[in-house]
Image: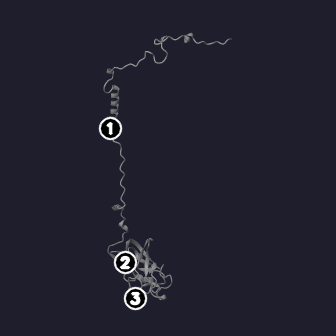
Amino acid sequence: MAAMEQRVPDEYFRPAAESDDVRADDAPRGLPATAAVKAVAPTDVRDGWTPRAVASLAVVLLGVAFTVGRLWVFPPDRPADPAPSPSPSAPLSASATPSTALAPFDGPVVAVRAIDAEGRCLEGGSREAPLALVDNNADTLWRCRGEGVGESVTIRFPGPRVVVGLRVVNGNTVWTDRYLAERRITGIRWTFADGSFFEQGLAAHDRTPQEVRFPEVTTDTVTLTVLHTTPPGGSGTSVDAVSIGSLEFLAPA
């Protein structure tokens, strides 16, 4: 069976009608012989803005006016000013000041009576018993031979007492010729029944009672521990010793 050929309709091959502006006797392609530049009459050129230019300018002016008006009504947000930092030299507020609860007591005081004192000299033997510290007798003293560092005595009260200070006479003030010859204590630690303590520095050449005040503490015992002493002022083993002439504790009056 022979393949069928598909034919394109004849009308696709019909000659196209000649255009009205094409003539057999036309001049060759290019600029027609009769072509000429059309002159524009002077009256056709209008003075001033053309309508299109005026419309464009109006659009531009409208946009500028809109932008300016928006900036006027809605100004741009400015960054917030940073909070001023406190001056390093600014004084602390009253709420930031340390509590006065830890301030030493500065009111009137009375003596607190102790009933006992216990201790033993590290290098053996003492001329006087520890109880001489609190017997209120100017003719007795507590004394231990040797350097004295580490020596301790525990003083007891009849019961819990509020204590705010103490007075101590440093050195051998009973044997007057031994005061400068023997050692003197320059540092003592005072420890209370609850384990709290403070350290007191002592003058090495002061024979009068040296007083110290501290915040109120309730306790039934106080332990003194020798921390520092001076070298002996004289020669020989007899002057190598530390002494306390008297000790008195203070309570609020």
Instruction: Give the image's coloring scheme.
Output: one colour
Mark 2 / mark 3, whichever is N-terminal? 3
Mark 2 / mark 1, whichever is N-terminal? 1
Q: Position of residue 22 (x, y in %)?
A: 47, 12
Cα–Cα span, label 2 and label 1: 82 Å
Q: Is disc 1 in contact with disc 3, using a CB cutoff of under 8 Å?
A: no
Q: Residue at x 43, y 79 (%)?
A: 186
The amino acid type of the residue labelled 3 equals Thr
Residue identified by numbered label 2: 211
Helix, strand or loop for disc 1: helix
Residue identified by numbered label 1: 68
The amino acid type of the residue labelled 2 equals Glu
Q: Residue at x 35, y 67 (%)?
A: 100
Mark 1 / mark 3, whichever is N-terminal? 1
User: How many marks do you count on the picture?
Assistant: 3
Which label lies toward us, 1 or 3?
A: 1
The amino acid type of the residue labelled 1 equals Val
Q: Is residue 215 placed above or below 231 in the rendered structure?
A: above
Q: Is residue 155 placed above or below 88 in the rendered structure?
A: below
